[in-house]
């Protein structure tokens, strides 16, 4: 008979934790409110560093042919004298890679192509093209509208699902946590003027899905415990529910972060800002699931008699 080893696995996270999360409720609420207000202020004052997708114009990614670091200051002087208006130049990824943005030129497609030819001729044989993107003003405006619409519809659809699946208090907590996640990520991009393009919109939509998945897991455990523990104080019950799902929350977050870090380091310059937005979203989404979505139930006063469903699951756990 073939020998099969008895492997039981390993618990990376201790079970039966008793962390008092509700003790930090007020501090976290105020910290989140301040973060949201600051993010809105940054968005209104500084705005976002829209990529070519949303602003229109020409984006050119080049790399030095010799492999030596690019002289960004010399490039600014050289390309600034071409008469193309605002030309932004920055290192992108490795020190020998440069990202050049040329503002929207008059003359529609012909004007953009003429500007592109001027830049390529000025760079000469010292640089090789890696990527070129040309977007017109009509297309960029439409992409901006559809991007905002996509995020708005996603938030509303998630709120409707949670409201249907749970009670209205859970839906309010989920909505506030999702708005918090999106606003803080957008605020960070506005603060550091990181490029905001269609890839970041895709990252925001992915963040919404990740965050609501984590929130639903915690909410489902809270609802089960509301039916199981009839006389337990709500604050204590919320702590119990978060602690019971904490190992799942931490391990899911850590494994996701490991993959995203690998993409951030080895995924190349094209994936860098997308991966950064995802990393921020996972960290902020995990925080909001624990310190916003759950504690808001105590503020709104969710009642046991209004909680429906989950009888079989609660009975089985009892």
Image: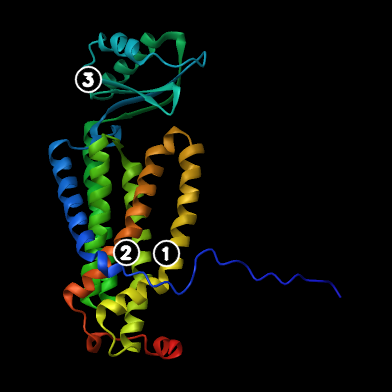
Q: Is residue 236 placed above or below 285 in the rendered structure? A: below
Front residue (pair 233, 179) = 233
Residue at 17% across, 41% down? 42
Left/right of residue 157 with respect to residue 130 in the rendered view: left
According to the picture, the residue beneath numbered tag 2 turns out to be 289
What percent of the width, then of the height, locates residue 283?
A: 36, 53
- Measured in 3D between alpha carbons, the distance from the residue under mark 1 to the one under mark 3, in whole angstroms, is 46 Å
Q: 10 Å neighbourhood of mark 3: few (<14), some, or many (≥20)?
A: few
Element assignment for label 1? helix
According to the picture, the residue beneath numbered tag 3 turns out to be 86
The answer to the question of whether label 1 and label 2 lie on touching residues, with beta carbons closer than 8 A, is: yes
**Residue 80 quadrant:** top left
Residue at 27% across, 54% down? 181
Identify the image quadrant of the N terminus: bottom right
Q: 10 Å neighbourhood of mark 1: few (<14), some, or many (≥20)?
A: some
The answer to the question of whether label 2 and label 3 lie on touching residues, with beta carbons closer than 8 A, is: no
**Residue 152 quadrant:** bottom left
According to the picture, the residue beneath numbered tag 1 turns out to be 249
- Measured in 3D between alpha carbons, the distance from the residue under mark 1 to the one under mark 2, in whole angstroms, is 9 Å
């Amino acid at each position: 008979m073939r020998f099969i080893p008895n492997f039981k696995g390993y618990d990376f996270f201790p079970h039966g934790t008793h962390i008092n999360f509700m003790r930090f409720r007020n501090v976290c609420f105020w910290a989140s409110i301040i973060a949201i207000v600051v993010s809105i202020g940054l968005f209104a004052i500084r705005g976002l560093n829209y990529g070519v997708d949303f602003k229109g114009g020409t984006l050119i990614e080049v790399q030095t042919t010799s492999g030596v670091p690019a002289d960004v200051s010399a490039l600014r002087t050289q390309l600034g004298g071409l008469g193309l208006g605002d030309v932004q130049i920055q290192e992108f990824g490795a020190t020998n890679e440069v990202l050049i943005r040329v503002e929207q030129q008059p003359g529609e497609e012909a004007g953009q192509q003429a500007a592109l030819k001027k830049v390529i001729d000025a760079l000469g044989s010292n640089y090789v093209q890696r990527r070129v993107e040309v977007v017109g003003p009509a297309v960029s405006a439409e992409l901006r509208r559809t991007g905002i619409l996509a995020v708005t519809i996603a938030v509303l659809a998630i709120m409707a699902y949670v409201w249907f699946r749970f009670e209205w208090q859970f839906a309010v907590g989920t909505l506030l946590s999702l708005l918090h996640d999106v606003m803080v990520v957008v605020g960070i991009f506005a603060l550091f003027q990181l490029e905001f393009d269609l890839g970041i919109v895709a990252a925001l939509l992915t963040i919404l899905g990740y965050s609501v998945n984590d929130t639903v897991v915690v909410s489902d455990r809270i609802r089960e415990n509301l039916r199981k523990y009839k006389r337990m104080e709500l604050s204590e019950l919320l702590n119990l529910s978060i602690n019971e799902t904490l190992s799942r929350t931490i391990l899911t977050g850590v494994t996701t972060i490991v993959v995203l870090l690998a993409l951030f380091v080895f995924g190349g310059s094209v994936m860098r800002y997308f991966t950064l937005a995802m990393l921020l979203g996972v960290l902020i989404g995990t925080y909001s699931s624990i310190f916003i979505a759950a504690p808001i139930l105590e503020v709104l006063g969710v009642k046991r008699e209004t909680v429906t469903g989950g009888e079989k699951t609660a009975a089985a756990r009892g």
